[in-house]
Amino acid sequence: MIEIEGVSHAFGDRTVLQDVSVRLGEHRIGVIGANGSGKTTFARLLNGLVLPQSGSVRIDGLDTRGQAKQVRAKVGFLFQDPDNQIVMPLVEEDVAFSLKPLKLATSDLDRRVDAVLGRYGLANFRTHPAHALSGGQKQLLALSSVLVRDPAYVVLDEPTTLLDLKNKALIEAAIDDLAATVICISHDLEFLRGFERILVFEAGYLAFDGAPDAAIAFYVASQTCQ
Amino acid sequence: MAGLFGAGIAVFLLSDLGMLLGFLALSLAALAAARLPPSYIWAQIRPFVVMISLFLAAHAVLTSFETGLVVVTRFAVMVVLGLLVAMTTRLSAVIAILEKVLAPIALIGLDPAKAGLVLSMTIRFIPLVGEAYRDISAAQKARGLERNFLALMVPLLIKLLQRADAISDALIARGVDD
């Protein structure tokens, strides 16, 4: 369960979130909103990348303020641009890097790296340089590096924005298949229509919270009326 | 790596040209045995051929041709062995060795694992810096500013700083400092 209570946050003079309170227990949660509406800041609250200036964020009872390490073990985060997330030169090295804190035996580490790369069709690219991968492959590699830790939650910040149609379909299929709870920020409204719940952010407020069809209709109406 | 270090010491203690040429032949045989693509090997060695030629010419003028041959043969052995180690050793193994060698820095409060991470990330992001430069260069060329140093360097610097910020967030999200 994700519990966000009375959260407000500002960057300098700019308020980005205002008094947001929500409890999220569903398995697939979408987050939509115009640029600058606060949805990325909201996403970053969930793994402690942003600590709220007021209010609290709890993930399965763990407070992001005092228990960030435990929160990050539970919450994986996929950024919009995989080139910012992949930090090691080779494919297998980047996935193995995620497992370094666990201090696993080499055989266990190799097994887990093999399993996740095989799952996302990257097994034949194990020793390839990361920069030589296509956009979709890079995002799959970034996703593999997140999932190899078996997080209970995966937050995805516009995971397909930089991808072409084919790679977008690849990533969306991978997201559909995840066992973890997914919180996905996206401008792809049709993809989020298959989710269980959608939060709509507007000027830092949680403007709508409900079923996908109603949330999308609210959002589209709010954008076309301006 | 230890072998490379030992070979380096041995090569510089030898001054007999015949023995050095024998050492070079063995190194080239080891490189051939690694079965790396010849075109790839040549691409790596080619810059050193120019350097070796310059060293030989300099010695021929300043000392003697024979001394020059000894010096460039030593250099050639190290280039071939260095290439062999670099092409057949995983970066992760090199980083692991570096972290072990740097272990004493922990005594002064520094983290050897972070030194290894810095090296890995440097290698990882070099191609991206090149890509960023090419993108900006193309954009500025479209504006007729391809010869303007500031028009190239300022956006590049800003882009790299923004990327560094984003990478920092990604490292935190991946629990690097936890």
Image (cartoon, grey):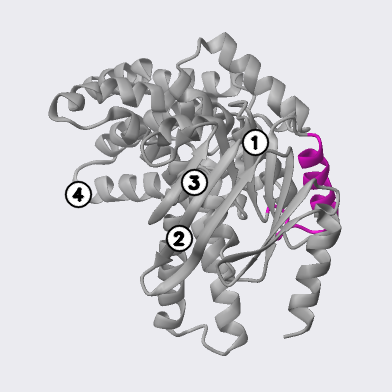
Q: Are marks 3 and 2 in contact (CB under 8 Å)?
A: no
Determine if marks 4 and 3 fall on one subunit. Answer: yes
Quadrant of the rendering where the N terminus of chain B is positioned: top left
Q: Quadrant of residue A171?
A: top right
Front disc: 3 or 2:
2
Q: Residues within 10 Å of mark 2 (few under 14, many from 20)?
A: many
Quadrant of the rendering where the C terminus of chain B is positioned: top left
Determine if marks 2 and 1 fall on one subunit. Answer: yes
Q: Chain of mark 1?
A: A
Q: Quadrant of residue B98?
A: top left
Mark pair 4, 2: CA separation: 74 Å
Q: Residue at x 30, y 31 (%)?
A: B70
Q: Which residue is mark 1?
A: A128
The residue closer to the viewer here, B82 or A5, is A5
Q: Residue at x 48, y 54 (%)?
A: A6
Determine if marks 3 and 2 fall on one subunit. Answer: no
Q: Residue at x 60, y 30 (%)?
A: A151
Q: Which residue is mark 2?
A: A8
Instruction: Provide the secondary structure element on which disc 1 rests.
Output: loop
Image position, residue B38 (x, y; %): 64, 35
Q: Which residue is mark 4?
A: B62
Q: Chain of mark 3?
A: B
A10 lies left or right of A155:
left
Q: Chain of mark 4?
A: B
Front disc: 4 or 2:
2
Instruction: Provide the secondary structure element on which disc 3 rests.
Output: helix
* Chain part drawn in magenta: A159-177
Q: Which residue is mark 3?
A: B170
